Every structure is written in structure tokens, then in C-alpha cells.
Image: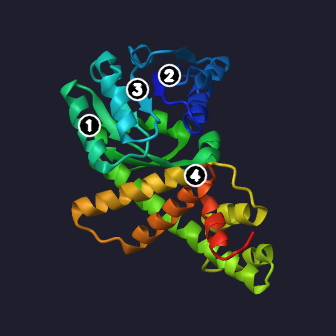
Amino acid sequence: MKIAVLGIGLMGYPMARRLCEAGHAVHVWNRTPAKAEPLASFGATVHTKAPDAVRDAEVVITMLDNGSVVGQVLFDLGAAAAMRKDSLVIDMSSIKPAEARDHAARLSELQLQYLDAPVSGGTLGADQGTLAIMVGGKAASFERAQSVFKVFGRATHVGPTGSGQLAKLANQMIVGVTIGAVAEALLMCEKGGANMARVKEAITGGFADSRILQVHGQRMVDRDFAPRGKMTVQLKDMRNALSTASEIGFEAPITTLFEQLYAQGVEHGLADLDHSGLFVELASRNGMV
């Protein structure tokens, strides 16, 4: 299958590489070409213009920073106009549900199919093909995309267009809040004189255990905040969740609190840390190094 991937960043790179390894004819584009060029060694064709990458592709995957960038690449840079009729656009970026519905409507006018299919699992999941993929759109388009999704992980069709992004917002709300809970709890134990690593070990397997405790909690123990998912990305997702909540008349006080905490962490110079770096913000508030 001829597949185009637009956006070769921390997630887009391993996903494009996996498509190459699965035997697909992969065409890639990135605003900074140097990030995409190493994919040539896996058999990908690297393009300097987005319309050239998507021409004649059966499936076009976007993995970009936010909804505005997705719209710019698809419509302002001419990618959508260059696609052949009935191509399937799979937006795997994390954007607002309202933006997904808008993009779907505009692509439909060009006789193009669309799925919003954001992912969870981070760079490790992208590298290993174990991503959780939340998909919104028509059932027929979802079935058409199965051979692509299986390269990346496990896909679930959660409803009509925009529903995939709603599910991703739910995922990010839970991730962001749980990171904060783990950080605050471990820091309190350390402040009180307990061994933080041993506390993490002690509560493993109990009701407080979680993927966040295991992965992000270990990063906190190791003081390893190299970015896998940045603080700024987590903040963007929390703000998208609050924007969507406002649109549908839903009150989200817990997410509101954590949006403020992540925002303050970013303001205090933690923007480029992993989102588990909220630990650093909470440690600073408590006078802890």
C-alpha cells in the first residue's frame, strides 16, 4: 500500500519506520527535512513538499503538533488538494474534537475519507507497535484502515467523527491527573522521611498501582525527566479538554486544577521536561531539591 506520513517527530518517525518494515511504500514529509531524511535508509521516499508526498497515496497519515498545524498542512500547504479522490486521511495527531469535525467536513467536499485516530502509549509504544488507538469516523473507513492500524498497535472504533479525539482527551485527563497524584504522594513520603523508591515498590500491586506509577513513578525516583511527552504537550491537551468541556457545558474542576499546575510548571522553566516533570514543580513548592 502506498502510504504518506506527514509529520516526522518523536512519534511520526518510529511509526513511519514501522510502516516501511511492514513492506508498505512509504512517502514522508516534515517541515524540517533533516528529521525525515534518516527514514530513507528504511526505504521511505523523503519529500520536501507535502503535496508531493501525498500524491497517489491510498492512505495519508498526519502526526502533527496541534489542530492549527494539521489544518495548515492539509489546506494551506495544498496537501488535501493534491490527494487522489477517495484517499483515506487518518489524523493521528491530538487535536480538538471540533477541529476534527471541521477537517472531516472540508475533506469530504474534496471526496476524501477521514478518521480521527489519536494514540496513547508514547514513543515506546510507537517504537514497539503497542499503541492504543482511539478512532472516530465511519465504520467503513475504520475497516479500511485495519491493515495500517495493526502496524501501530490496537485500534478501537469509539464513535462518529471527533469521538477519537474525545477519547484521547479522556486519556490525557487521566494521565495528567494521575502523574500529579503519584508525584505528590511520593514527594510527601520523601519529605516525611520514607524511601521514595521503596514506597513505590510497597504500593505496587495494590489498588494504587497503575501504568503511570510504574513508568512515570520510576522516572520520578530516577529523576529522569528527559522528554518522551513534554510538559507543553500535556498542557495543550488539558487546555483542549477544558475547551471541549466548555463547548458541551460540562464542568471539569479536577482538570481545571491540573491545567493550572502544568501551566505554572511551564512558566517556571519546565517546558521541555517530560510531563512527569510536574514532580519538579511540586518539589519546588515544597522546598525540595
Name the kind of residue labelled 3 in the image: Val
Residue hosting label 1: 104
Q: Secondary structure at mark 1?
A: helix
Instruction: Look at the picture and state if 158 lies above or below 206.
Output: above
Name the kind of residue labelled 4 in the image: Ala
Badge 4: how crowded within 10 Å, few (<14), some, or many (20+)? many
The Cα atoms of the two marked residues, 2 and 4, are separated by 26 Å
Residue found 59% across the figure and 38% down from its top = 10
Q: Secondary structure at mark 4?
A: loop
Badge 2: how crowded within 10 Å, few (<14), some, or many (20+)? many
First in sequence, mark 1 or 2: give its number: 2
Residue hosting label 4: 271
First in sequence, mark 3 or 1: give its number: 3
The Cα atoms of the two marked residues, 1 and 2, are separated by 21 Å
Q: Between tags 3 and 1, which lies in front? A: 1
Residue hosting label 2: 29
Percent of width and height locating residue 134: 42, 50
